[in-house]
Image: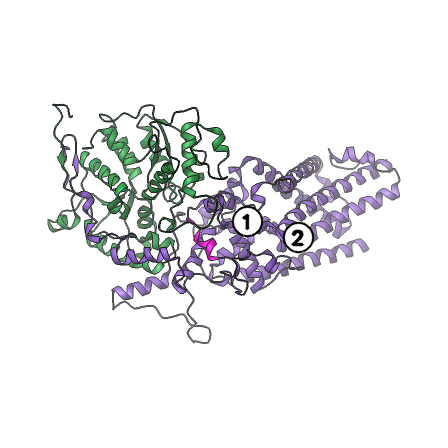
Chain colours: A purple, B green
Amino acid sequence: MLQSILFALLLIAAFGLFAWQVRKIRANVLVGRARDMGGHPAERLRKTLLVAFGQQKMFKRLTPALLHLVVYVGFLVINVEVLEIVVDGLFGTHRFLSFLGPVYSALMATNEVLAALVIVAVAAFWWRRNSHPPLKRFTGPELRLWPKLDANIILYVEVVLMAALFFMNSADIRLHQVEGKTLPGAFPVSQFLSGLLPASAGTLAVLERAGWWIHITGIFLFLNYLPSSKHFHIIMAFPNVWYSRLVPQGQFSNVESITHEVKAMMDPGYAVPAAPVGPDGAALAPTPFGARDVDDLPWTSLMSAYSCTECGRCTSVCPANLTGKLLSPRKIIMDTRDRVEEKYNSPLIFRPNVYGAEARHEPVTDLATATLLRGKVTPEELWACTTCNACVESCPVNINPLESIIEMRRFLVLEESAAPNSLNVMFSNIENNGAPWAFSPSDRFNWADDLYVKGPLPETAAV
Amino acid sequence: MLPETAPAPRQITVPVMADLAARNESPEILFWVGCAGAFDDRYKRVTRAFVRILDHVGTSYAVLGLEESCTGDPAKRAGNEFLFQMQAVQNITTLNGYGIKKIVTACPHCFNTIKNEYPALGGDYEVIHHSTYLQQLINEGKVGVTGGESFKGRRITFHDSCYLGRANNIYEAPRDVLAALDADLVEMKRSRANGLCCGAGGAQMWKEAEPGKKEINIERAEEALATLSGAAAALANLGGVETETAAPGPHDLQGSIIAVSCPFCMTMMSDGVKNKEQEGKVQVFDLAELVASAEGINA
């Protein structure tokens, strides 16, 4: 009874704290600019099933895809056991799902095999990150300090949780053996481990309870660690893929406020829509062109920042990064999350994301500026982008770093006139000559001079 | 020397939209030349090759001539949305004024901009990249890719343009065109959706690269050359420090071709090949040039 009450309190605290953190994150995402992402439910569902549930884009790289699949399926299946643990904890039952008989045996056996495989996969993940040298995409200036520690904490916690599961099952098997009973279910791993445990019923009962409490408390702690961690992707990947852009990747967003201005210039009779008004009826301050800070980005970009698991596939295929430039698409996504938590809600218990100056790009970052642009992302990074969409293509959860890059370029050009000089020359060439180069517009058709073709006249003559 | 039986080369008078409109005629397609196709000496040859093909198959086409202006792509990618929209609205006014329905262009940047970004500003057209158009001509048998230069057995690798490939999911059309040449097609490791940018997109064409350890086009040229020569060790070392010369492989590079479908890729890959001092052996050609040569219609 006491255990049930304690457990109920723990359960309420865990989910209450998690809900409180999620609300803060939701508020952070909604500081972004409005963007209508409605419609196309069938296409969105298909994408979510393929890319999020089906891990489609993970399989561009087979080894990590298989390792990740083990952990992902393990997570999904072991959740069934968590459900059992919660019911047992609340009602003082013991393995209440065991009435399922052979299904229960199959479930427990699957759990145990997956848990063992998860430990193997996690060991491989750890090696890929921590060997000398680690995989290249697990290096880089943005992956020091907290992000590096965070990645390892996740791996250690996963091992502890799986170990607690085995510990709980082994002690339970051994306890039943000592008491001359049979534990329902099949346990292909724990049946061997149980032999290592002592034969005292009293000790075993304590060990079994300890394993049970460590497992479920660990899960609750981990749940509340998620919002502070890149591991939050296990939740956010799904809405992020659902709200993917459905237009061709080459299509950049249109800036409607500029469309109104251009149309008004071309046609004096064009009626520009009235400026939006606030709840008090007064006109709202005009929003800047492009993005200087996180609240200038569309909300989808902020949601993406919470979906990023810092795997670095984007950066590893970025032509600028590959050739030694400062640009790293992953860093821009991570900077966005850090900045939104610095400026708005910090949903974190420990605020570990905020390392301040230590984590920034010295010396190019302007430490005095507290905005996403310049404060975290430097113009040098932004101007190195070739807009090739390799980062967008590579992201397993459909994050679009290119969109944020373009929004910040827009701010630099349209609000600060801070384009590199050579680009300003290109702009004035377009304005004056209708071409990005300094050619005379009257020479535009010279290519057609003295043009000959060999062969007979076509049957249908050219117009 | 031309064989005696061959007819003499004919001069092409490229039809201009304004003249057609004055005669109340409307062409089936508008050929959007693009700034590189109109001004860049190297890419003018692509424009001329493509017009030879259009003429050769008897397509009803026209160009805007002096009325064409930059689509605004480089301005938009560089963040200058205002200049982009000014250009776009101006071009849309011209195109809509002539009632244009179908546009073919040899520039993936013009293609992407007109196809994807003009509709929001009032310009709705069927837009086709010339790789798709050439593929259709070959499929329909209008172009046989015979009678001219033979590419049989020559090693060709195709460099994907970002704005054709990842931006618009066109990967097969250019490869189908090359397949018709009966050449020895070899794929780079980074191809199709994993293709590596030439380094010119996003307005990089008009500026110096940021400080780094290598130019992107050198990285890509090294990959193309190593793929053509079969230098496996060089391929494994890509992404590292730039090497002085192209690594030798089992295949002689003489006569090999890097095929492109974009004016900026053309510039970047040609410069990369020159940087590796292989321009005497390896040539960079656009698809239209290869088709026109194979068809034997260059004059």
Tell me the residue at 27%/25% (across/down).
Answer: B150
Pinpoint residue A257: horizontal percent, then vertical percent: 36, 64
Question: Which amino acid lies under the numbered mark 1 shown in the image of this protein?
Answer: Ala
Image quadrant where one finds the N terminus of chain B: top left
Q: Are marks 2 and 1 on the same chain?
A: yes
- Chain where mark 1 sits: A
Quadrant housing residue B188: top left
Pinpoint residue A326: horizontal percent, then vertical percent: 50, 50
Tell me if label 2 and label 1 are in contact, CB under 8 Å.
Answer: no
- Chain where mark 2 sits: A
Tell me the residue at 66%/46% (across/down).
Answer: A152
User: Which one is in front, A166 or A61?
Assistant: A61
Pinpoint residue A204: horizontal percent, then vertical percent: 85, 42
Determine whether, in the image, residue A303 is placed left or right of residue A255.
right
Asked whether A148 falls inside the magenta stretch, the response is no
For disc 2, the marked residue is A223
Measured along the vertical axis of the image, is residue B60 above or below residue A265? above
User: Which one is in front, A99 or B80?
Assistant: B80
* Distance in Å between CA atoms under marks 2 and 1: 16 Å
Question: Which amino acid lies under the numbered mark 2 shown in the image of this protein?
Answer: Leu
Q: Which region of the structure is painted magenta? A: A377-388
Asked whether A378 falls inside the magenta stretch, the response is yes
Pinpoint residue B299: horizontal percent, then vertical percent: 18, 33
Determine whether, in the image, residue B182 is placed left or right of residue B297.
right
Measured along the vertical axis of the image, is residue A370 above or below residue A41? below
Q: Please, what secondary structure does the residue beneath circle 1 have?
A: helix
For disc 1, the marked residue is A237
* N-term-proximal mark, 2 vs 1: 2
